Amino acid sequence: MVVNIHKKRELASRILGVGVNRVRFEPDKLDDVADSITRENIRSLINNGSIWTAKVKGTSRGRARARLETKRKHGTGPGSKKGKKTARVGKKEVYVIKVRSMRKHLRILKERKDITNEQFWALYKKVNGAQVRSLSHLRELVKIVKTH
């Protein structure tokens, strides 16, 4: 026997406080749903688990995020850059990165015992005093210190 459970669905949606399309019935318990007339009957079926609500389906932001990533990468070529190099990365930040890399290199050389403690501090002070231009310049200075 086919039973119209449209009104039961409406009643359940009002009780649950959701839209009609989100109300779900247990297929095995459709007879019980059809027999239920009052709100109390519907509430008992909800408590039993014969009636429940489907979760809301949201719109995935995955594709949008991927598109944003490519958008961020585009237009960053040399033709789109305006201002000096220091406008994008500050002078201090460049200095800090350079000095840290040089100090790390010196520390590694000292740990490997490629240079002595005295040589390490001599070079360290040169780095600190901005007498070393770059990491490659530091390597050259290390070679000079080693030969002497």
Image: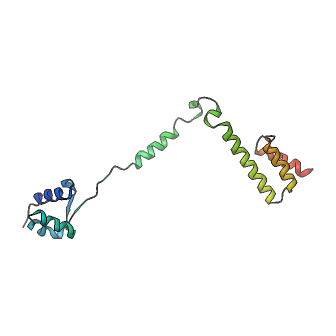
Hey, which residue is sitting farthest left in the picture?
1
Residue at point 76%, 52% (across, down): 105
Instruction: Return the x and y of residue 36 as percentages of the image width and height.
Output: 10, 66
The one nearer the camera, 85 or 123, is 123
Instruction: Return the x and y of residue 108 as percentages of the image width and height.
Output: 77, 56
Q: Write down the quadrant of residue 43 in the picture.
A: bottom left
As drawn, is 133 to the left or to the right of 33? right
The one nearer the camera, 61 or 123, is 123
Residue at point 28%, 58% (across, down): 55
Q: How is the image coloured?
A: rainbow
Instruction: Return the x and y of residue 141 as percentages of the image width and height.
Output: 84, 46
Hey, which residue is sitting farthest right in the picture?
148
Instruction: Return the x and y of residue 102 as percentages of the image width and height.
Output: 75, 48
As drawn, is 53 to the left or to the right of 91? left
The one nearer the camera, 110 or 79, is 110
Residue at point 76%, 42% (across, down): 134
The total of numbered circles placed on residues is: 0
Q: Quadrant of the N terminus?
A: bottom left
As drawn, is 135 to the left or to the right of 57? right
Residue at point 18%, 54% (across, down): 20
For residue 23, above or below residue 27? above
Hey, which residue is sitting farthest top in the picture?
83
Hey, which residue is sitting farthest front in the picture?
40
